[in-house]
Amino acid sequence: MSFVQTIRAGTLPNPTGFGFKTDAWNNAYQVERDGSVRDDHVYLLGLVLGQQAGRIQNSVDHLASQLRFRTIDALVPHFSRRVNEVQRMAFDSWGKAVSEEDAISGERMLELKCFVDAAGNEHALQVPMEATVDSICNSLKLLRHTAGLGKMEAEANEAVDIRAGIDHFMALAQHSLSIQRVWNAVIWWQAEVLVDPNTGNYAVDDSCSDLAQRATVDLVRRPALLARNIENFKKTRDDGHHPGVFLPHITLEDGRLAVRAVPAFQIPEPDRNALLASRSESNILQDAALSGFIQKIHPAVGLSIAEMLVVWGELALMASQLMMLARAREATVGDAELTVILESCLKREEVLDALKRCVQLSADKAAECLDFFCFTAARSATLWDKPLLRSGDDVALLWWPLQGIHHARVLSAWAKADPKLKAAFGKKGTANEKLLEQGMLDAIRRGPYRERIRFVGAGLEPPLKPDEEIDMLIVVDDTAFVIEIASIPSPAEAYEFHDTEGRLEQKAGQCKAKCAVLAEDLSQIDGWDKDRPEGSKINRVFGLVLTNSCLRDGYDSSGLRYSHWDTLLNLIGSGGTYFGVMRGTEEVTLMAPVRIGAGESLADAVIATLTKSPKTEFYTSFLRSAVYKLKGFDSTDFEGTYCACEINVPPQTELEAQLTTCSFADSLVEVDGVD
């Protein structure tokens, strides 16, 4: 076992955590190192980052000595102001950048570099937002042992203004988060690392990491895939524009925020329409496989998950109104009203009263749901699934987590708290299998190769080994495709992608075993394949792991292939892969059809297309290396550079030119728009 493997096993202290012990690190290195240069540099990086983590803790202690003690409740308005202020500034920058584009795709909108950090690094919109939200979370965790910040007596004169102190404290938390992510990239991405043993300065490069590259493509493709796969789940109440519909309405009164439920018709039409549209959008389930899970009752709240999502949607409406109020004001120094809006602290009782009327909940249920959404600084807690902060009798709303909910991650986090819910969430895989079965039948029925592709069955038990149940079996010409379905979470961090890789490898092993069972005696298929044309026969078996992730779309694993299920369903249902581009102001749809070469079967062509997925090739062509400066804590601290793997999506009008550089360019044909 190498030193890095020992670190992954979790038996060594994390250098980026507080309380890191150099002696334990040195001893483990002497015992576990494998003699490689990489082990040496990982060891040195651990020492460097461990020293930085220690300096951060010392700086937090020094800052605390200059401030009067304040409880976390008292600090909450400062935290919420910071994250919401960053969102306001980021969206202003993003809006200006978008306005300069003649035509823009969804991917391009998300990837526009419109925000510059303190080190001069340029970022897309979501980067500063995620970093700020995570730094708030990290800040609250840093304070959980002291229950607040500050060591001076209440009557003492502070050496630091509290607002400047909070900004400095959050900068420390962000620095802590940055070195954690550098460390995770080295350990879980297998990023290259070099450390100067004399100066301690370091360079980390994940742009050459195969996993980092595939994860980057996976992340940028997710929004478009989610948009195509959403399913409306309907609320029991009517959303019409009549006086019976109540909307939460926020106003600024006497220097504080007030929220109340008002009939929709009382809100001016432009604002009313925007709020109703936002409410409707929040009621779209992002993953059809979760439609069964959301009917489950959450034991801690006493409401169904669906009802909790409706409450979340109303809170997101409040966040949207607060953001509109803030963006409508010119930012001026000392604007007390803008500060109040950015702090977004609402009276808890007013929020509950508004929820009761808008969502038609009892007072008790509304209170339990609201309390459940409030963040508690446990070790694994995040603000992405608990986006409210308590502050005495108020609750502070963090706009970005409320508005940008990701159902798969949020519901997974909620489910972990209860064994029954966790088991119910785990059945998402079964739901996906049923959806895919219907999707496959529909694709074959409407596809151009319907005479050459047959759906044989799902949940099949081979006679030679019934326990090797086959998730799905289709036949293309003379080839039986053994399909193993893998429903995986939505990884975001390096270690989560590493874990996902392990799960997919496990699925590949299962698929290969099932292929081997069928290949041992192909006549086992005869009992299932009732619609086989007379005289035709099956000559081979091919394994395919079908997943809801693009992480391994087009990946070849010892003769077995991985594919996102959209990729396969599009190949079967339309005979190719679609791309949307712009020619001037005209939207055009191009298709890369399945290409059947001379002497090839349709099965050969399908396998070739899955082996080199056009979508994956297209997105991979946008991969670029971006170098970021990792400034030292101060002039005496170590500095680093981080070479990151990123996607640079060009403007919509340049996508067709990019397609011409792909290997399938000569096969592209223009087709009618796709629904």
Image (cartoon, grey):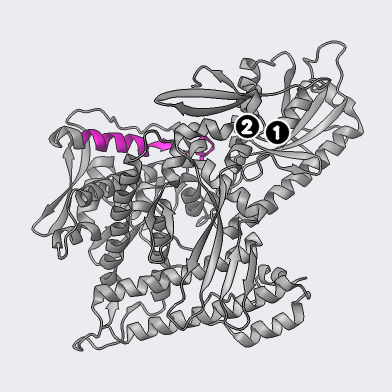
What is the spatial separation of the Cα atoms under label 1 and label 2, in whole angstroms? 8 Å
Between 455 and 609, the one lying in front of the other is: 609
Residue 389 position by quadrant: bottom left
Residue extent of the magenta highlight:
272-293
Between 504 and 50, the one lying in front of the other is: 50
Type of amino acid under label 1: Leu
Residue 217 position by quadrant: top right
Type of amino acid under label 2: Thr
Is residue 73 at all visible to an observer of this figure? yes
Q: Which residue is mark 2?
A: 567
Q: Which residue is mark 1?
A: 610
In this view, 380 is above or below 564: below
Could you tell me what secondary structure mostly forms the magenta stretch?
helix
Position of the N terminus, as image quadrant, is bottom right
Q: Is residue 282 magenta?
A: yes
Relative to 651, 82 lies left or right: left
